[in-house]
Image (tube, helix red, strand yellow):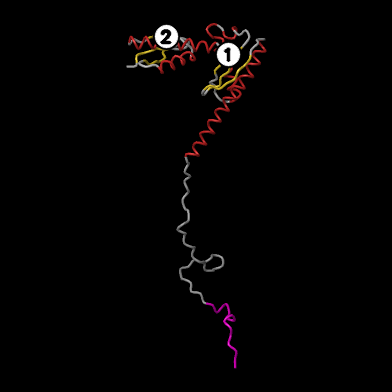
Amino acid sequence: MSTPQSSTDTAADDVVVDVPADAPADADTGTVLPDPDPVDADAVVEPVDVVETDEDSDDSDDEDDDEVDDLLVQEGDVAGDYLERLLDILDVDGDIDLDVEGDRASVAVVGGELRTLIGPDGATLEALQELTRLAVAQSTGTRSRLMLDIGGFRAKRRADLTELAGQAASRVAASGTSERLAPMNPFERKVVHDVIAAAEGVRSESEGEEPNRRVVVLPAS
């Protein structure tokens, strides 16, 4: 009696595979290649848009604010070093206070005899402020709007201009007639504009060219 053959003895070349006539073949070996798998319906085929949450936006704003504050502090440090060297050269005694006011670095030279650094109507102070801004810009690579005060001149001038602008606003609001103020530098004009902007029934604008540019206070209507 013959022993039945196991199915495992079947020769590999006896296996018949049905292949479609149009199936692609490998160019080198002639081997028929299978069709690619269909694309999964769950596959991501488009870039995913990243949606920024309010928390992410707040964090970004905080980082921007920190960068601005750091730059203003750096401006103050550079200005302080520059002014210290200047005081040594001029042999003038004075202490330097650094601060940040709003969106500007603020530097004040206080103490000692400082009138020579202020000049008539603050002219020397204005020149020193521009020189200090240039020194800061050269160091940081960024245009500086730093504010310099010496001997409390600007603080006193701000108080005087605030009172003057308030009085002018009252007169114009009552009379309905515009009023031109004396020529002022940019710092002084800004102080006046700020006061007028907070008053009712009046508005302000600047006219003329430097150094004769002035503020005009007008009725609001």
10 and 54: which is toward the camera: 54
Say the numbered circle drawn on residue 176.
none
> Element type at marker 2?
loop
Question: Disc 1 and disc 2: Cα gap in Å?
Answer: 26 Å
Q: Nearer the viewer, residue 24 or 152?
A: 152
Q: Is residue 196 above or below residue 51?
A: above
Q: Which residue is mark 2?
A: 181
Instruction: Tell me which residue sits at (62%, 19%) in the image.
Output: 80
Residue sitting at 58 percent across and 85 percent down?
5
- The verdict on residue 174 being magenta is no
Identified by mark 1, the residue type is Leu
The x and y percentages for residue 92 are 65, 10
Query: Circle 1 sits in a helix, a strand or a loop, which is it?
Result: helix
Mark 2 surroundings: few (<14), some (14-19) or many (≥20) residues within 10 A: some
Contact? badges 1 and 2 (CB < 8 Å) = no
Question: Counting other residues with Cα less than 10 Å from the Cα at mark 1, is it few (<14), some (14-19), or many (20 or more)?
Answer: some
Which quarter of the rendered picture does the N terminus lie within?
Answer: bottom right
Vertical comparison of 35 with 16: above or below: above
Q: Is residue 6 magenta?
A: yes
**Quarter-wise, where is residue 14 in the image?**
bottom right
Q: Which residue in the protein does label 1 denote? A: 128
Q: Residue at x 48, y 74 (%)?
A: 18
1 or 2: tag closer to the N-terminus: 1
In the picture, the quarter occupied by the C terminus is top left
Residue mark closest to the camera, 1 vs 2:
2
Residue 153 x %, y %: 54, 10
Where, by quadrant of the figure, is residue 183 drawn? top left
Main secondary structure of the magenta stretch: loop
Give the residue type at disc 2: Leu
Residues in magenta, as a range: 1-15
**Residue 167: % across, % down:** 41, 9
